Amino acid sequence: MADLPRRRALLAAASGIAALAGCSGRDSASNSYPSRNRPIDDYELEKARDETGSVLFTQSDTLPSPPSDERAPQRRHGRRVLTGESSLSELTFAETTPAETLRSFCAATDFDAASVYLLATPVDACREVRFRSVSVERDELADGDLHTHADFCQTYRPAGVDCDLDETHTVGFAIRIPVAADRSTGAGRGMSGSCRTPSGRPEAFNGSVTAPIGGDDA
């Protein structure tokens, strides 16, 4: 782990970057967050979908199986902010390709310079969850405590996708942000039931799994 002075410098730099982002003239950014939150634009994003509806990760030592565990639907939900190797080691990931995709992305993070917002949520088989934006709370960050908020939306999958209305899938997002912190004691999530833009048009579909830095993911 980096020494405290270096982390404080990184935190200060991150706050400065975020402040600039909040003054960049983007109406959607300035109108979407309370004044203490600032959007992060230079993120990296990984998305995975498990069509069996299995749990992607958990803080316990074992993973429930949806067919045999009545609490499994609730356990499909997961939200964590990883600020170091120790917080990553507290999680157990499923031995599936989608879960491994997320785990590998998190493990490749340089926690001396970045953190990861990790989310898992169930979704109807014929719908998809899209990432919209991520922000940090500057006041808490100044004390080394990273509070991250990410916004998502849901929409129907393309008409050509074969899906069963009665099935539930699990989707996961790992968002790497260029902010190092000592810890994280809070994280927020927004989920809109529509992915329509302010103009009233739906957002363009992008089938890629990994979005480039600062890019949008479907």
Image (cartoon, rainbow, N blue to C red):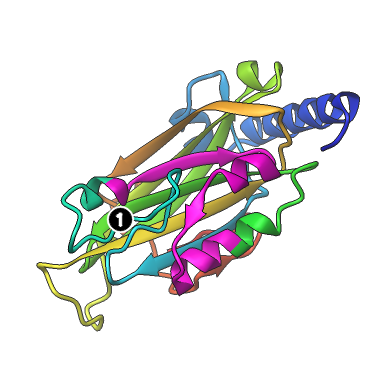
Tell me: 204 left or right of 47. Answer: left
In the picture, which quadrant includes the N terminus? top right
Q: Residue at x 32, y 61 (%)?
A: 170
Q: Position of residue 161 (x, y in %)?
A: 25, 80
Question: Disc 1 residue type?
Answer: Pro
On the image, the x and y values in percent for residue 151 come to 42, 42
- Magenta run includes residue 73: no
Which segment is the magenta one? 75-103
Q: Residues within 10 Å of mark 1 (few under 14, many from 20)?
A: many
Query: Can residue 196 be seen from the camera position used here?
Result: no
When asked about the image quadrant of residue 19, the answer is top right
Where does label 1 land, which residue?
A: 64
Q: Position of residue 10 (x, y in %)?
A: 82, 32
Asked where in the image residue 9 lies, by quadrant, the reply is top right
Image location of residue 157, percent across then percent down:
27, 70
Q: Disc 1 on helix, strand or loop?
A: loop
Could you tell whether 152 is left or right of 21 in the image? left
Tell me if 41 is positioned left or right of 9 in this view: left
